[in-house]
Amino acid sequence: MAETRTPSEKAPSRRAKVTRATWRSLSGLLRPHRGAIALGGVLALLGSLTGLVQPLAAKWVLDDLGAGQDMTGALLTLCVVVVAGAAIGAVSGYLLSRTAESVILIARRGLVDRLLRLRMPAVEDSEPGDLMSRVTADTSLLKQVTTSAVVNGATSVITLVATIVLMSFMDVVLLAVTVGVLGVVGVAVATIMPRIAKATKESQEAVGRIGAALERMLGAFRTVKASGAETREGARIHEAAGEAWTAGVKAAKWQALVGVTAGLAVQISFLAVLGVGGARVASGAMAVSTLIAFLLYLFYLIPSIAGIVQALSQLQVGAAALARIEEVEDMEVEHSTDDSGEAGVGPARLRFEAVEFAYRPELPPVHHGVDFDVPAGGMTAFVGPSGAGKTTVFGLIERFYEPTAGRVTLDGVDVRDLPLGRLRASIGYVEQDAPVLSGTLWENLTFGAPGADRAAVEEVVEAARLTDLVARLPEGLQTTVGHRGSKLSGGERQRVAIARALLRRPRLLLLDEATSQLDAVNEAALRETVAAAAAATTVLVVAHRLSTVTMADRIVVMDAGRVTAVGTHDELVAADPLYAELAATQFLVPDGLEAPVATARPDGDGVTAGFGPAA
């Protein structure tokens, strides 16, 4: 019988697993720079060791002074040691800081590459602002791990050991007094460090929530203002900022307690050594110069102990940041290949075979055995009530999502068997909200075809009826369009998105509500553009207005995740109750033609006569 463990029993092993993964990740980041880190560490160690020579030189000066000998040699030696230590320390500091910045650069590039390959469900389950925080704030904390925690911590340990060894040669009794008092530091650090790690992780998570709240607010800035929601959104951000402050203060409290404990231990050590050492000098057991040198070594213990404490503290901070970065590594990504991304030639043939799909296992299915055929070339339109699953068809074609049953084929090949680069190079996609990116109009038009020449761009500008817009813009195609195309109207953004898709010369053109924000004149003009494109490619259209699709070669009617009818506009008006009802609502049924009687929908509701954003 399998052994069962309680949650409390499982927790330690889980923490150990996370710790091991965190340090494996850190090791992977440091490995490419191990030479530079080793050199910087050696230089830092040399700089520290030169400091250990100074108390011996000081003892030499005092002994020469007491014996009435010339002190010139001792003083010169002391000066050389001080200058050399400072120079070596400066070089080491620069080298380690430069290496730390390189580690951050590699971590950020790797994280960005990972984010770009995330599957759509993983992105939809995350807050964009929190993901941005991991790329910016969390990676910045790696600098502390690389320099202070790893190198400086190791250097401080070696220096501490070397100092104790030298102190042992001077007086074992005083060394025993010192070590006994400093043992308190180890107990305090071991007790407090886990609390610092917990508080730091909470702080970083709160910073991520600040980013998420800011992204939410800025992403719908007009809506926030129009709704008079500035105070409410500000309160949401203030709450996240307050949580970050609380966690940061908690971490600072524990860090301060560690620092105070370490400093207090050193001061008590000094007083104890001074008292015991003074008594030994008075009894003749040791020389004054030895006591002074020992006290100097004791003060050299202070930066070593402080360095160790700081390193342990920053290791906890870095571990929290690395754990958040590792969480991104655990997210599901698309498996790309080395495919060149060449799209092939000619219109594509598409087929859905008994496709079933649900966005989450716990959610009801969106598609229930969807079947339809799209021959190569021509226009196929998808219509149906809101929530029918029309937009989901496009998401499955692009492989943003995978069917839970059935398959989607392109030219007879399951899209899951096609390299993603080749599949998506075959497709031009215009989304519902027609996103326009910050940058110039030229950059937006060529976003999917960066190698396009000016003649090709001007051709799609004319086809998408953007010529007048380009003529009005102060810098033509090189005019910046603002954040998310804020300087363009909704209809202009849609036409830019259509032109961008056409410039790819796709084998399959997907238009999702692509003309919903256009006036009647521009809609009619773009219908002609789409009709012309259908002669050279396969066009799939999800339509809000049936006037857009009456000219389609075939219309697929969807309702409640099923295909209920396929035909031309005239055939469906005459034979399909749902389509006829929708057409009648939009005054597309010819006078004198009576629409078929609508029957109840599969889910029990009556026919919905309007269109909205598709599922």
Image: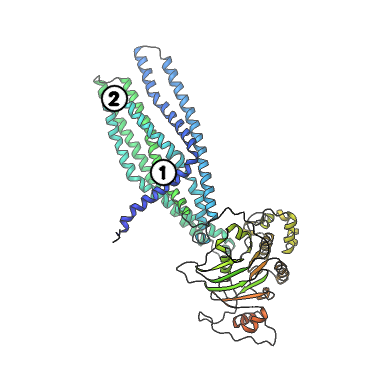
Q: Say whether residue 268 is left or right of residue 347.
A: left
Question: Which residue is disc 1 drawn over?
Answer: 315
Tag 2's secondary structure? loop
Q: Is residue 103 above or below residue 47?
A: below
Res 250 visible: no
Dot 2 crowding, Cα within 10 Å, few <14, some 14–19, many 20+: some
Identify the residue shown where x is 32% and y is 38%. Answer: 185
Dot 1 crowding, Cα within 10 Å, few <14, some 14–19, many 20+: many
Q: Say whether residue 184 is left or right of residue 196.
A: left
Q: Residue furthest left?
A: 283
Taking depth in this image into account, of 601 and 128 the one nearest to the observer is 601
Q: Which mark is residue 171?
A: 2
Q: Residue furthest front?
A: 412
Q: Which mark is residue 258?
A: none
Q: What amino acid is labelled 1 in the image?
A: Leu
Q: Is residue 569 above or below residue 293?
A: below
Residue 561 sits in quarter: bottom right
Tag 1's secondary structure? helix
Identify the residue shown where x is 46% and y is 57%. Answer: 239
Q: Say whether residue 226 is left or right of residue 499.
A: left
Residue 179 x %, y %: 29, 33
Distance between mark 2 and mark 1 Cα atoms: 35 Å
Residue 288 x %, y %: 31, 20
Specify the quadrant that holds the N terminus. Answer: bottom left
Q: What amino acid is labelled 2 in the image?
A: Asp
Q: How many discs appear?
A: 2
Specify the quadrant that holds the C terminus. Answer: bottom right
Q: Is residue 134 above or below residue 405?
A: above
Residue 462 x %, y %: 75, 62
Q: Are marks 2 and 1 in contact (CB under 8 Å)?
A: no
Residue 373 sits in quarter: bottom right
